[in-house]
Amino acid sequence: MPELPEVENVVRVLRRELKGVRFGRVRSARRDVFHGDPRPPQELLPRRAVHSVERTGKRIELALSGGLRCYVHLGMTGQLAVFPRSDPPAPHTHLIVDLQNTDAQLRFRDVRRFGGIWLLDGAERHVGRPLPVARDDVLKIDWPGFRRVMQRDRQIKALLMDQHVLAGMGNIYCDEALFAAGIHPVRRAAAIPEDRARALHRAIRRILNAAIRAGGSTIRDYLGARNEPGRFQKAHRVYGRAGKPCTRCRTPLVRLIAAGRGTTICPACQPLRTGPAIRRAKSPRTRRSRAVPRG
DNA sequence: AGTAAACTCCGGAAGC
DNA sequence: TGCTTCCGGAGTTTAC
């Protein structure tokens, strides 16, 4: 599923393929994918040039000529990519935009339709769903900013995943970062010692940047803007590995629900109670501690 | 007021 | 083969 690294890869490809390009004919089958301006995309998009392609959190932001802004959220199964016109559109393709002076098309496809497209040109009446918030991008926030976020009396996982607080953290990279920093997902953020919060801030940036370089993670659906899967799923240490041994201490990983989401942790490396500092096991065969799923 | 949990959307996958 | 259940990003609603 597309999270920040996957969206960043899509944006990098689209930036090169779309910048300066002008939209031609537009086709869209269903209206409920479009929000914001009540006018249909067939009316709003043709003849617009793409000025820029940016990202905030998991949100793609296209600035178009004439002051129209186009935001795309991929939700869980969304894909935004350029295809040759000769490629038959895959099922659940909701928008096809011809690119002028090329044989290519920009297409938006979204099987489950948790994603959407927002067309906004300022003062128009807003229809459909509200634009998903995207405040401070988690990859761009500095330590003082992150430290302020951590003052809240909330479960750390719920806090990190709250797009009103930090934009860009999703389930996969949240679990990976919490594991890397040795923090249990339901610990209260404000109670986490400062050195560990700092380790978390570093882990988040390190993991997200590594995932971007690896082209993101493909679990089931995600394909990049060149229609290729990511490779970072091979580097996952907890996500999707419940029951398998921890890569650090060999304790079986445990699945639980945190922040309403399926969550995988190492119960030994991510203790709920404040304990002695976690030290990295030198040999991958330390004693196994309890692997009791907590209730 | 701030937090948390349940519910909504949807369709594919997995399980019975 | 054909049900039912589960899952989740993010908004909304409801309840502490």
Image (spheres, coloured by chain):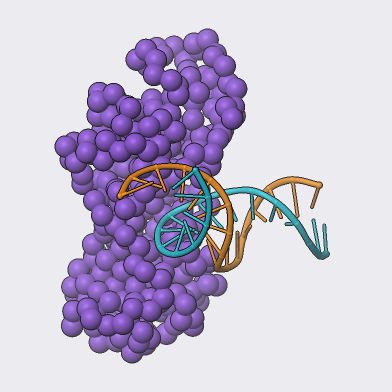
Chain colours: A purple, B orange, C cyan
Looking at the image, residue A221 lies above or below residue A120: above
Between A16 and A291, the residue placed more toward the observer is A291
Kindly give the residue lying farthest to the bottom in the view shown.
A43
- Residue at 31% across, 82% down: A125
| Residue A78, image quadrant | bottom left
| Residue A158, image quadrant | top left
- Residue at 55% across, 35% down: A256
- Residue at 54% across, 39% down: A257
Q: Position of residue A11 (x, y in %)?
A: 29, 60
The answer to whether A57 appears left or right of A286 in the picture is left
Between A19 and A133, the residue placed more toward the observer is A133
Q: How many marks?
A: 0
The answer to whether A218 appears left or right of A134 in the picture is right
Q: Position of residue A283 (x, y in %)?
A: 44, 11
- Residue at 30% across, 63% down: A60
Q: Position of residue A209 (x, y in %)?
A: 28, 42
Residue A49, visible in the rendered structure: no
Residue A115, visible in the rendered structure: yes
Looking at the image, residue A46 lies above or below residue A294: below
Quarter of the C terminus of chain A within the rendering: top right
Q: Position of residue C4 (x, y in %)?
A: 75, 57
Looking at the image, residue A173 lies above or below residue A79: above
